[in-house]
Amino acid sequence: MDPQTLHFYTRQASDYARRADRDEVTDLQAVLRQWLPSRCRVLELGGGSGRDAAWLQTQGYQVTYSDGCEAMVKQAVAQHGGLQGRALTAEVPLPSSHPLLGRRFDAVVAIALILHLDDGALAQTLAQLVALLVPAGRLILTSCVGAGRCAGVQTAARRDEDGRLMCLRQPDDVSHLACRYGLQQCSVSWQHDGRGRDRLWYTLVFER
Ligand SMILES: C[S@@+](CC[C@H](N)C(=O)[O-])C[C@H]1O[C@@H](n2cnc3c(N)ncnc32)[C@H](O)[C@@H]1O
């Protein structure tokens, strides 16, 4: 994990996770409901506060929650007791010895994770995700591009004011890369930023 990005989430785990649980995520939940086969096995990567993993549990999914930041995993379990025993630390790309690599899932979800991965890490992670999915398994990725005063930097890798690595890619770029690893795009949809920042979010759905 990018060291400065990890440092931010470690230092801010508690505040960040409390704030994230108050985010407006109705649009995201609609996409998840539409594309996740009912009650299937879902792996969440970069799950942050556990907000989406906990919600998926309420919808009957068998969820494995993970995040690359240990402090965030602890905070997520503290905020969502139902994740106890279903939560683990997993930094992507996964090291070859990581236990997740021996498991298979019907779906993998990564909300606002790949924006923290540089091109090399994203390519390696996509290759691993294909191996984690059963045939016809679904991958749901959410990321963002700059909007408003940030529109000009939307394809540049840069750091935000907190030092986090921000790789703002167009959905087509992510899609082309995913297709190279054998994934087929099923859908792309756009969402406004729930906190009013100069960002436009998109959700890509792929099938293996
Ligand atoms: C922008 S937050 C999104 C959290 C949550 N998915 C949400 O939508 O609120 C990004 C999360 O990804 C985690 N993360 C960043 N780089 C990672 C990596 N290389 N592997 C796994 N998790 C990572 C961070 O610790 C953080 O919890």
Image (cartoon, rainbow, N blue to C red):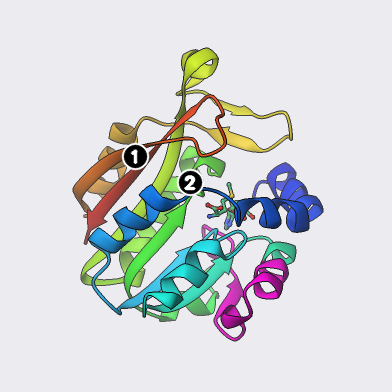
Please tell me whether residue 38 is drawn above or below residue 173 in the rendered image: below
Q: Is 206 covered by the magenta stretch?
A: no
Residue 114 is marked as 2
x and y, in percent, of residue 204 in the image: 30, 46
x and y, in percent, of residue 147 in the image: 46, 21
Q: Nearer the viewer, residue 25 or 139?
A: 25
Instruction: Give the quadrant of residue 48.
Output: bottom right
Residue situated furthest bottom in the rendering: 85
Does mark 1's beta carbon lie closer than 8 Å to ligand 1? no
Number of callouts: 2
Q: Nearer the viewer, residue 195 or 157?
A: 195
- Label 1, on which residue? 174
Specify whether 177 is left or right of 74: left
Instruction: Give the quadrant of residue 4.
Output: top right
Specify whether 76 is left or right of 96: right
Residue occupying image coordinates x 47% and y 39%: 119
Label 1: few (<14), some (14–19) or many (≥20) C-alpha neighbours in 10 Å = some
Kind of residue sitting beneath label 2: Ile
Q: Nearer the viewer, residue 64 or 132?
A: 64
x and y, in percent, of residue 9 in the image: 72, 51
Instruction: Give the quadrant of residue 129.
Output: bottom left
Q: Which residues are magenta?
A: 73-95
Residue occupying image coordinates x 40% and y 61%: 109
Kind of residue sitting beneath label 1: Val
Residue 124 is marked as none
- Dot placed on the residue nearer the N-terminal end, 2 or 1: 2
Specify whether 51 is left or right of 79: left
